[in-house]
Image: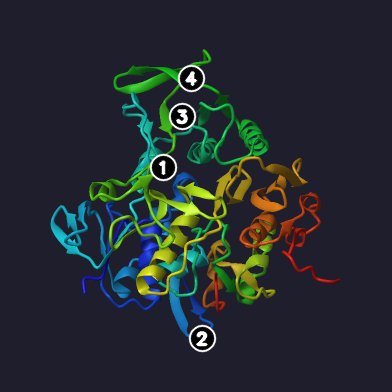
C-alpha cells in the first residue's frame, strides 16, 4: 500500500494527518510542506507573534516529536511540482511519492498588486512574511496598509501597539465589506480611529513615489498623500490550485471544486482548506472559505472519508479576529435580503448583531460577547423558528430564541 | 531559581504525563509541545474555541477573566469550579508539581 500523500502542512493538512491516525488508519502518511519551519498556527502571525509576545516555537501546531511518534512522515522544505492521477504519483523536486489517496491542502497565497515591487513592501501570509514584517515594525515608523480586511486591520492594531503611525487605505466605502454588516464595519472603523489609526475609505492608490527602490509615499485618489516608511499589502488571497489544475481538476470561484466527500474531479484526489470551493448547504451556494474552522473541519472530514467512516461535509462556519480590545467572533455566512438585530451594549463595547432571514437564524457577529458566539455555533445548525425580537433582549439567552420545529412543547 | 517548571497531566482514563515547560509559557503550549493527548487547542491560544479545557489544581486558582468565564460555559465536557482554559494559564514557579486533570472530551 502506498498510503496517503498530503500536500500542504498548514492547519488543514496537519489535521488530516492527525485525524487519519486517530481514526486508526494504518497505511503510510506523507505530509509535504513547502516551508522550512515545522507546521504552525497562522492566526498569531498578525497578532501575538507579530507583536513579539509569542516566539515561533510557541505557536507550533504540534510538538517537535509528534509526527515521528505518530508515524507521519513530515517532508519540510519540499515543493510538490506535479500530480499525476494516472500513475497516482506526486512529483517532488527530488523524487516521486506514490499514493493510494492524495489530499491537496495547498492553501492560499497573498494576492500581489501590480506596481508594488519595492524593498519596503510587505505581505503577510507565512512565518517568513511575519518575521520580515516584524523586523520592519520600528516604533515611530510610518506604516501604510493597503486593504481594510482582517489582515490589514489586525496588523494596524498590532502596529499601533508597537508605536507606529498607521494609515489604512480601503477601496470600498467601508471596512470588511464582504465579511461584516455595515453597522459592524462602522463600529470597527471608529475603534481603530480611537486607537490612532487613520482610515481612508473609498480611496485607491493613484501613484507611488519611490526612492532608491523603496516606497517613500503614496498618493491616493482622493488627493491625500501618505508618507510611508513601509507598506503592507493586504488585499486578499489567491488559492494555490496549480497542482490540481495542471492535472485537470475542476475549479470554481478560484478554488478546487470538491463535493461533500471533499473529492476533486480527479479520482482518489481530495482537496481541503483554503484552496477549495464547495457547496455549503446553509448558504445554499458554493463558497470558498479562508478560515481555521474550515481547514480543521475539512481535515477531520477528509480523514473520515479516507479511513472509511465518512459523512457529508456540512459545517457551521465560524471565524475570529482580535483587534485592539475587540474580540470579534462570527458564525454563519451572510444571505441576501436578511435583517440585522442589535443585541447587547454597543456603548460598552459588548454586543452581537443577529442576522435573520424571516424566522431563520443566518449569522451572528459578536464583539466581546463570547456567550452569544458560542451559543450561535450550537444554534446555527439547528432547525427551528428563530425569534429575532426576543433576541434583542440580551438577558434572554440566544438558545431560548429558537423554537423547535413542528412540534411545540407544552409549558 | 530555575525557569523550568514540572507539571503533569492526568487523562480521563487515568494515564499520567509528566512534562516540563518554561516559566511564562502557557499550560496549553506545554501540553502541545509534549504531545499530551486530550488538549485540542484549535484556536492556538486565542481563547476562541474552548478546546483546551482542564481541571486545574488549587494552586492555579479559578478563572477571573470574564471572557474565560463565559467560554467555560461552552466546554464539551462538564464545567466544574476548577475548570480553566489552559491557554490562559501561564506557568509560574509556584505551579511546580501541579497536576492538571483532562476532561474526557474537548469537542
Q: Residue at x 65, y 57 (%)?
A: A376
Chain ID at mark 2: B
Q: Residue placed farthest to the front in the image?
A: A406
Q: Residue at x 45, y 75 (%)?
A: B37
Query: Where residue A146 is drawn, which disc sits there?
Result: 3
Query: Are the residues under badges 3 and 4 in a single subunit?
Result: yes
Most foreground residue, B7 or A203? A203
Looking at the picture, the colour scheme in use is rainbow
- Answer whether residue A43 is visible to the viewer in this image: yes
Horizontal arrangement in the rendering, residue B80 relative to residue B87 (left or right): right
Most foreground residue, B92 or A184? A184
Spatial separation of the CA atoms under disc 3 and disc 4: 12 Å
Q: Are marks 4 and 2 in contact (CB under 8 Å)?
A: no
- Answer whether residue B22 is visible to the viewer in this image: no
Query: If the image is split into quadrants, where does the C terminus of chain A sit?
Result: bottom right
Looking at the image, is mark 1 or mark 4 earlier in the sequence?
A: 4
Spatial separation of the CA atoms under disc 4 and disc 2: 60 Å
**Other-residue count near label 3 (Cα within 10 Å), few / some / many at <14 / 14–19 / ≥20:** many
Q: Mark 4 or 2, which is nearer the eye?
A: 2
What residue is pinned by disc 1?
A: A253
Q: Residue placed farthest to the right in the image?
A: A411
Amino acid at each position: 500500500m502506498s498510503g496517503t500523500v498530503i500536500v500542504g502542512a498548514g492547519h488543514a493538512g496537519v489535521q488530516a494527518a492527525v485525524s487519519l491516525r486517530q481514526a486508526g488508519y494504518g497505511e503510510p502518511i506523507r505530509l509535504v510542506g513547502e516551508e522550512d519551519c515545522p507546521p504552525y498556527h497562522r492566526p498569531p502571525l498578525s497578532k501575538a507573534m507579530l507583536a513579539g509576545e509569542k516566539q515561533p516555537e510557541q505557536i507550533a501546531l504540534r510538538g517537535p516529536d509528534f509526527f515521528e511518534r505518530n508515524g507521519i512522515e513530515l517532508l519540510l522544505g519540499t515543493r510538490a511540482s506535479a500530480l499525476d492521477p494516472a500513475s497516482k504519483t506526486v512529483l517532488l523536486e527530488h523524487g516521486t511519492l506514490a499514493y493510494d489517496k492524495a489530499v491537496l491542502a495547498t492553501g492560499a497565497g497573498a494576492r500581489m498588486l501590480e506596481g508594488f515591487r519595492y524593498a519596503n513592501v510587505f505581505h503577510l501570509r507565512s512565518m517568513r512574511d511575519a518575521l520580515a514584517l516584524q523586523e520592519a515594525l520600528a516604533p515611530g515608523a510610518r506604516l501604510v496598509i493597503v486593504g481594510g480586511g482582517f489582515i490589514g486591520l489586525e496588523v494596524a492594531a498590532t502596529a499601533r501597539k508597537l508605536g507606529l503611525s498607521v494609515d489604512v487605505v480601503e477601496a470600498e466605502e467601508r471596512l470588511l465589506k464582504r465579511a461584516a454588516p455595515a453597522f459592524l464595519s462602522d463600529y470597527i472603523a471608529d475603534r481603530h480611529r480611537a486607537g490612532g489609526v487613520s482610515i481612508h475609505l473609498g480611496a485607491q492608490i493613484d501613484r507611488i513615489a519611490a526612492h532608491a527602490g523603496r516606497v517613500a509615499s503614496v498618493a491616493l485618489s482622493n488627493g491625500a498623500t501618505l508618507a510611508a516608511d513601509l507598506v503592507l499589502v493586504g488585499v486578499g488571497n489567491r488559492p494555490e490550485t496549480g497542482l490540481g489544475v495542471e492535472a485537470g481538476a475542476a475549479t470554481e470561484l478560484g478554488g478546487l471544486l470538491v463535493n461533500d466527500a471533499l473529492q476533486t474531479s480527479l479520482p482518489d484526489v481530495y482537496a481541503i482548506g483554503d484552496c477549495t470551493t464547495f457547496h455549503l448547504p446553509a448558504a445554499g451556494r458554493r463558497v470558498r472559505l479562508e478560515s481555521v474552522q474550515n481547514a480543521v473541519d475539512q481535515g477531520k472530514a477528509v480523514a473520515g472519508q479516507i479511513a472509511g467512516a465518512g459523512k457529508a461535509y456540512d459545517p457551521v462556519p465560524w471565524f475570529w479576529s482580535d483587534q485592539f480590545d475587540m474580540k470579534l467572533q462570527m458564525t454563519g455566512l451572510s444571505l441576501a435580503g436578511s435583517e440585522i438585530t442589535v443585541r447587547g451594549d454597543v456603548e460598552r463595547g459588548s454586543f452581537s448583531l443577529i442576522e435573520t432571514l424571516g424566522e431563520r437564524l443566518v449569522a451572528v457577529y459578536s464583539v466581546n460577547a463570547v456567550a452569544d458566539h458560542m451559543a450561535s455555533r450550537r444554534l446555527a445548525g439547528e432547525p427551528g423558528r428563530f425569534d429575532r425580537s426576543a433576541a434583542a433582549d440580551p438577558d434572554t439567552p440566544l438558545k431560548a430564541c429558537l423554537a423547535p420545529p413542528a412540534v411545540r412543547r407544552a409549558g | 531559581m530555575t525557569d523550568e517548571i514540572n507539571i503533569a497531566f492526568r487523562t480521563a482514563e487515568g494515564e499520567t504525563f509528566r512534562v516540563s515547560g518554561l516559566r511564562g509559557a502557557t499550560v496549553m503550549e506545554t501540553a502541545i509541545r509534549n504531545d499530551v493527548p486530550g488538549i485540542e487547542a484549535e484556536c492556538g491560544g486565542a481563547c476562541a474555541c474552548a478546546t483546551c479545557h482542564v481541571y486545574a489544581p488549587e494552586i492555579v486558582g479559578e478563572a477571573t477573566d470574564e471572557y474565560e468565564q463565559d467560554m467555560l460555559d461552552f466546554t464539551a465536557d462538564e464545567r466544574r469550579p476548577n475548570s480553566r482554559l489552559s491557554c490562559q494559564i501561564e506557568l509560574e514557579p509556584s505551579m511546580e508539581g501541579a497536576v492538571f486533570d483532562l476532561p474526557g472530551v474537548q469537542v
